[in-house]
Amino acid sequence: MAVVRDKPEPRNIKKGRARGTQAKHSQNRDGSSVELQQSLLNVFKGSMAERFNASLAPSIQTVKGHLFNREFSKAFGSEYLLEAYAVRWSPSRALAYMDLICSLPQVSDLLRSAPHNDSTSHRLRVSSLDTSSLGLQGSACGDTAASSATSTAGDHTSDDRVVTCLGGGAGAEIMALAGCWHYLGAVSNGGAPLTEQNELTRRGCTVLTVRVIDMANWASVVEKLYQGITTVPSVSECASPNTTIPTAPLLCSKYFKVAFNQHDVLDLELEPLATVLQNSTLVTLTFTLNELYSTSMSKTTEFLLTLTHLMEPGTLLLVVDSPGSYSTVKLSGASSGHIEGAEKKYPMEWLLDHTLLKASSIGSSKSTAEEPQWEKLASSDSTWFRLPDGLKYPLNLEDMRYQYHLYERI
């Protein structure tokens, strides 16, 4: 058992309806303009258009049933069910994640600035990430031929940004980062829309590589989304007949790459995990950490301590998960140190802070450091992302409430 997608939220959230006075509401930021949000939805719709048929609704119900019973191998055991999950739940999350990333200056500034990693001094000196990767071909940009989306740990240059998404196979993180990268490019372009030609000028040799790690085989979903991101959409992929047809892809394949690797992160040995994380600017755990804790408290704690040992100073860790009671972990008496049969609930945030801010500074089997290893930069135990009016998608989209915690390795 390892990185899995969490089961869907059990309620359908209506747009614009407040849910309690304590909830914090996200704003419709520049990075989440309706036009850009619609572009991401169009990619989901166009890249897996064959899934929008009469059998989709039964497939979604099948996935929900398996997830409710924690039958993850069945829920994610076929390409059809994987794509049904991706087109149903990933679009709303992608928009929420993009909104969050664009709103966190620590993250957006780090993606804009030169990376902290230096290949001559980097601590992770291991073999290149060359197993289980996909060669994902995109469209040509300008006069530059399309390049493979597969990125190995040793293929980047000093100008590259690398984001590693642990548990990101369903595509929400990929789409969110693509949207954010497009938005940052538009900002650099003075707010003007990106075209093939001015992206070449603006990007220079800067590449954003997204590494996706998941225990299920999301390879086909990742490839289809990547093709949708880096290919000019057709008329049929646009939201409505009145929509202006783009003349360029959302991103040029030369400057946006994706690599998928199928791994169980809780069972990864030190060297393969180091390879996965090598040269990362940002590491994300979105709607994954609580499932890891539920799978094995001890393995997840050891995994976080190993991340601490491997991640370079300056690297950011972004954790997003369900808020409140949805992120509590129940431990049996034997594992929690209490009397046999007793249970104790631990909020996920408390467990995370205890491991990163306290346990990692004391030392572990992977490190003997006694100084603080992490700084908590931003946090919210309950944030709302509310969808703007006007978005069009074949399935219902939902507002989303989540908690997030951003840390920097120091």
Image (cartoon, rainbow, N blue to C red):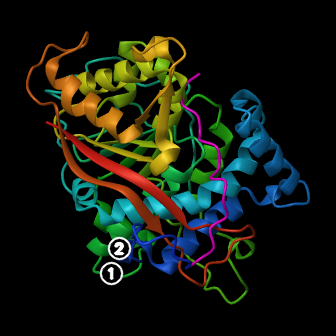
Image position of 249 with respect to 268: above or below: below
Give the residue type that dot 2 points to. Answer: Ala
Q: Residue 347 location in percent, x, y?
A: 40, 39
Q: Residue furthest left?
A: 371
At x 25% / y 27%, what residue is drawn? Answer: 308
Figure disc tally: 2
Viewer-proximal residue, 128 or 330? 330
Report the side of 284 relative to 167 (left or right): left
Rate crowding at label 2 as few (under 14), some (14 to 19) or many (20 or more) other CA atoms within 10 Å: some
Residue identified by numbered label 1: 191
Q: Are marks 2 and 1 in contact (CB under 8 Å)?
A: yes
For the stretch drawn in magenta, the main secondary structure is loop
Please give the residue where the numbered disc 2 appears in the rendered image: 186
At x 12%, y 30%, the residue is 372
From what the image shows, is residue 279 above or below residue 221? above
Q: Is residue 197 left or right of residue 359?
A: right
Q: Position of residue 36 (x, y in %)?
A: 49, 74
> Where residue 138 sits: x, y (%)?
56, 52
Q: Secondary structure at mark 1?
A: loop
Name the amino acid, label 1: Gly
The residue stretch that appears in magenta? 1-15
Q: Residue at x 72, y 39 (%)?
A: 68
Q: Secondary structure at mark 2?
A: helix
